[in-house]
Image (cartoon, rainbow, N blue to C red):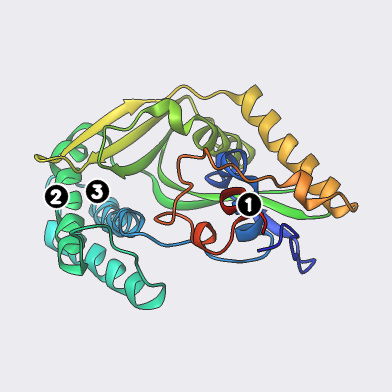
Amino acid sequence: MKTDINWNGEQIKIRPSSIDNFYGCAFQWAKVFLEGERSIPNDRAAIGTAVHTGVEELWKDAMLRGDKEQVNLSMAADAGIQAFQENEENEGVQYSDGADSNTCEDEVKTGVRVFVEDIVPWVDIPTAVETYLTMDIDHPVVNELGGTVDYLAPGTIDDVKTSKRKPVPQSYTTQQTTYKILAEHNGHKIEHQRIQGIVFIKNPVGHILPLEPNVPRTKFLINSLLDTLEAFHDGGNPAVLFRGNPKYMFCSSKYCKFYSMGCPYVNGVA
């Protein structure tokens, strides 16, 4: 695999979740976002996406009725499972040891149930869910900063996370601060941010955890990323601008298909 990056010249969108990825492994980031390659969709990510769909549907129902006491759990779980099956069919899923489509669908149902039991009673009905927020960017490579907010209420943004460990809010500071920047750019005053975490341990549990944004640092990270991309556009060496990181926590064949495809930062150059 060459370290050259074959960008087709079309401007791209930067998502809030991708900013930390750039600083984790710029080589993987460039292959995905500039070349349009796909990394490996694993079962944990597919479960998380499906749970998000179930949560979205239950909140839409609650918003329509103005009531969260009579949550239609069966409807929400079915929506999540359908989303998982569609993802499996369209994108393919790499399963971890001991997992298959049946075990993953069971986790989707469990995740939606835990959300209903441990999170819904303690938060207000949102004013909007899965809301896309955007900001135009004047840049030769990037034309937009944009992403989808899971939960929006007056003065509040929440993000739903699924994992096998209790989420650490500070791990999501860059992503969530970017959502704050986008929300305020679009006329929403944000005073509170939280992580709504669903943890798949032996007895799954939900957590609502406060998050403290860091606007100055996040703006610096975004601008540094934009500066790197501008240098690339102006003829900068991709091997220098988009270095790989074999110490990245997701540097493995489980999370990155480039790992087994001759990534020079893992395998060297013959």
| Residue at horizontal 26 percent and vertical 35 percent from the top | 165
Q: Quadrant of the C terminus?
A: bottom right
Q: Residues within 10 Å of mark 2 (few under 14, many from 20)?
A: many
Q: Nearer the viewer, mark 1 or mark 3?
A: 1
Callout 1 amino acid? Gly
* Mark 1 touches mark 2? (CB < 8 Å): no
**Figure quadrant of residue 90:** bottom left
State which tag comes first along the sequence, 1 or 3. 3
Q: Residues within 10 Å of mark 3 (few under 14, many from 20)?
A: few
Callout 3 amino acid? Gly
- Disc 1 is placed on an element classified as loop
Q: Is residue 46 above or below residue 161?
A: below
Q: Nearer the viewer, mark 3 or mark 2?
A: 2
* Mark 3 touches mark 2? (CB < 8 Å): no
| The furthest residue to the bottom | 89
Residue 212 position in % (x across, y down): 46, 21
- Which residue has dot 1 on it? 268
Q: Nearer the viewer, mark 1 or mark 2?
A: 1
Residue 85 position in % (x across, y down): 28, 72
Callout 2 amino acid? Arg
**Figure quadrant of residue 263:** bottom right
State which tag comes first along the sequence, 3 or 2. 3
Whether residue 16 is visible, yes or no, is yes
Q: CA distance from mark 3 to mark 2?
A: 20 Å
Q: Residues within 10 Å of mark 1 (few under 14, many from 20)?
A: few
- Disc 3 is placed on an element classified as loop
Depth check: 134 or 229 in front? 229
- Disc 2 is placed on an element classified as helix
Which disc, if any, is residue 113? 2
